[in-house]
Image (spheres, rainbow, N blue to C red):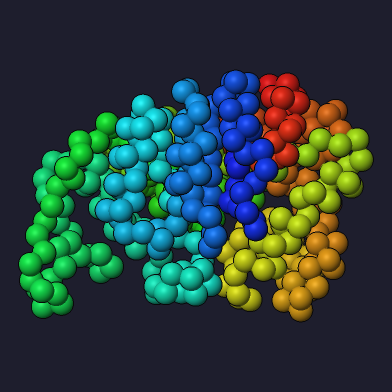
Amino acid sequence: MRLGYHTGYWSAGPPVGAQQAVIAAEQLGFDSVWTAEAYGSDALTPLAWWGSRTSRIRLGTAIAQISARTPTAAAMAAITLDHLSGGRFTLGLGVSGPQVVEGWYGQPYPRPLARTREYVAIVRDVLRREAPVAYDGAFYRLPLPATESSGLGKALRSTVHPLRADLPIHLAAEGPKNVALAAEISDGWLPMFYSPRMDASYREMMADGFAQRGAGARSIEEFEVTATVPVVVDDDIERAADVVRPFIALYAGGMGAKGANFHRNVLDRLGYSDACDEIQAHYLAGDRARATAAVPLELVQDVALVGPPHEIRSRLPAWEATAITTMLVQADPRTLPVLRELLG
């Protein structure tokens, strides 16, 4: 199991020490570094800026939202970053949720799996550069039909030759059907709130997708599972958990509407429905402090590594036995040397 570092997305401004953390991650032998976007900072610009100071570490987006840019725009960015980094870029994509898609991007959310399938197909067509890109889907049509346009559009081929026609595409997924889709059409899965207790179920979901995998895809043995795992080292386990609790409370209670929160659904499947009810009720009432306090220690320990070194070491074998190929640590960047030593 490799180690990666997740910078996350920005809060009110650029995260302090991010550039130094990315450089340190490479020097410490981390395999990859990943950025994210929600509705503030984008995922591509920081990755290019910080990644320009590196030479070996892989660079990925976890995630770039498909509603933020058209498939061809995503492919253009991927081709550009892959050239600039010398073939180190991985395009991590995700659908986000209806609040962001409809509220921020002003696009419809229905049928996200079908939309993702079309999106990835177009990106791959651009990367292969075998012919001008033409696509007639339910969501994306290239060129735009003459009945809906000036009629002057034409199928085009990228002027830039991709460095890698098989540049890896990873998909963020949480629900069973979405996980299966990632295993079917992509080169890797970016899970959220992964828990070793759910490993057998996740393997079954991926197996469903692998069974539908098309000819020409990378081998199943090369499929990557890059899971974001918060890691906090502290002799006081409750104090360590307190660092992670706001993150869980935000996603369980605030990231998504009531009844349409896919992040919360993951925690429901872990058996924390009652706790999530309380977290969500407090969060929607505007009481974030009580929402955070309602996150049980057991939930934190299920999806994160927290506490003194001996506690983290004792739990590490369970993570190493999972389908995860890269543990993407989300942590205070100043602790990266300690985490490298602790997690090996």
Left or right: where 289 falls relative to 9: right
Q: Is residue 188 above or below residue 28?
A: below
Quarter-of-image position of residue 275 = bottom right
Who's the residue at 30% across and 53% down the image? 73
Of the 4 image quadrants, the one containing the C terminus is top right
Choose between 94 and 13: the one closer to the eye: 13
Who's the residue at 53% across and 49% down the image? 36
Total label count?
0
Choose between 329 and 312: the one closer to the eye: 329
Q: Is residue 315 above or below residue 199?
A: above
Residue farthest to the right, as pictured = 236
Where residue 31 sits: x, y (%)? Answer: 54, 27
Quarter-of-image position of residue 210 = top left
Who's the residue at 34% across and 63% down the image? 115
Asked if residue 10 shows in the view, the reply is yes
Who's the residue at 40% across and 63% down the image? 67
Where residue 222 sits: x, y (%)? Answer: 41, 30
Where residue 4 sits: x, y (%)? Answer: 58, 33
